Amino acid sequence: MAKILLFGSGELGKEFTIAAKRIGQTVIAVDSYPNAPAAQMADYSEVINMLDGNALDALVEKHKPDYIIPEIEAIRTERFYEYEKQGYTVIPSAKAANFTMNRKAIRDLAAKELGLKTADYRYATSAEILKKAVSEIGMPCIVKPLMSSSGKGQSTIKTEADIEKAWQYSQEGSRGDVAEVIVEAFVDFNYEITLLTVTQRSGKTLFCPPIGHRQERGDYIESWQPAPMKNDVLKEAQQMAEKVTTALTGYGIWGVEFFVADDGVYFSELSPRPHDTGMVTLAKTQNFNEFELHLRAVIGLPIPEITLERIGCSAVILGSGNFENPVFDGLEIVAAAPKTDFRIFGKTTSRLYRRMGVILTHDKLDGAIEDVIFRAKQLASKVKVIQK
Ligand SMILES: Nc1ncnc2c1ncn2[C@@H]1O[C@H](COP(=O)(O)OP(=O)(O)OP(=O)(O)O)[C@@H](O)[C@H]1O
Ligand SMILES: [Mg+2]
């Protein structure tokens, strides 16, 4: 049986660990704090600062894993190249993990090297340079730290007066030691999707039915599957996803994010791992959920096909404030609703807007997706995270 060293132990890592344990793999779950969601499921757990390269090295040396699987972006990913040289398998690859943790690396690869359509963009290392970049791109535009996720440090510039504020805000939300930002033209999209893409060791690249989602404060609020879209638009997104995952190399599931606008499909960014919006697959919308697909692709089990089994929606349950030992009020209402399920992640601390759980609704294939979304939203609003 394979030994998996999982860097990051949040809700996505937890479901991945459950998938791995179901078929007898060994998992060592790592995070910066004890008893994280995946640590509650894993064989062993470790607590380190994952931005500390020496701490990563020590764990790799100690456990000698068959697979090193990053579950989050905020890791000293440069070290992964060294692990590959030493003969370790990094999922999906050192290149993929390293490129996607820095918006500059992945954007230049996608737009310049691969020629994918993206929002017009520039980089800036100071408020002055940002000002010049904004004058070239036009307003509205979006500023993002090169290293950040979940919308941290991200803001929209609508007028000249926003530029200085946007720079300041980006510096507060940036992770790691890079002060640079990307500024992107605002894409007035009709909808956005995540295209879960599976690259296999032997076997062709597979695509999950597209997932639609809605974002607030840089994090997803609801995601649904399938996202209604025209077949030629979907094909275009699939071709772009195939190109970028091939260039990044490796095996596993990827969450490739696109904007669909009147003038075509824009590549936005991608996760080289299960995607948060992909939690909708926990509603058993597919023959295998995104975590099972990741696991199979990682350990080299063939995946013959991905099929849509029913339609579904996930809606997040967010923390209402900062406190320990949160409990959940209103779960009886959720449990009493038909065609509904939920997950509570088991996080021991609530923070404002922290994702604590998810509502899952579904219906038959010929059901109406709007109704499934409506039910998920309604039920999510009934659950309150409260102090014990
Ligand atoms: N250029 C853009 N035009 C319009 N909307 C955008 C643009 N860039 C980002 N957004 C909106 O902001 C959301 C978050 O952006 P992005 O995915 O780049 O940030 P992130 O911090 O990496 O988020 P996450 O890590 O949660 O995926 C997008 O899903 C989209 O709704
Ligand atoms: Mg994103």
Image: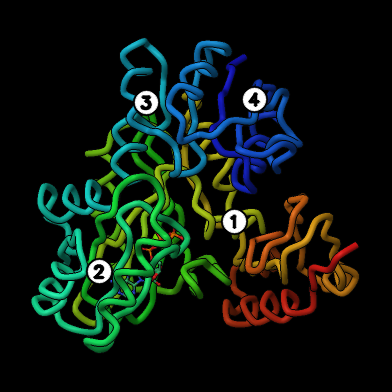
User: Along the line of sight, which residue is nearer the eye, 92 or 146?
Assistant: 146
Question: In the rendered structure, which amino acid carries the disc numbered 2?
Answer: Val
Q: Quadrant of residue 78?
A: top left
Q: Earlier in the sequence, mark 3 or mark 4?
A: 4
Label 3 to label 2: alpha-carbon separation: 32 Å
Question: In the rendered structure, which amino acid carries the disc numbered 3?
Answer: Phe
Q: Which residue is mark 2?
A: 265
**Residue 134 left/right relative to 61:** left
Q: Quadrant of residue 74?
A: top left
User: Along the line of sight, which residue is nearer the eye, 30 or 227?
Assistant: 30
Badge count: 4
Q: Earlier in the sequence, mark 3 or mark 1?
A: 3
Question: In the rendered structure, which amino acid carries the disc numbered 4?
Answer: Val
Q: Circle 2: is it few (<14), some (14-19), or many (20+) Cα within 10 Å? A: many
Q: Residue at x 26, y 68 (%)?
A: 232
For numbered disc 1, what is the local secondary structure? helix
* For discs 1 and 4, the disc positioned in front in the rendered view: 4
Q: Which residue is mark 1?
A: 279
Label 1 to label 2: alpha-carbon separation: 23 Å
Q: Which residue is mark 3?
A: 80
Q: Is residue 297 visible?
A: yes
Residue 27 is tagged as 4
User: Which quarter of the figure is the C terminus placed in?
Assistant: bottom right
Question: In the rendered structure, which amino acid carries the disc numbered 1?
Answer: Met
Q: Is residue 286 above or below residue 61?
A: below
**Residue 312 left/right relative to 343:** left
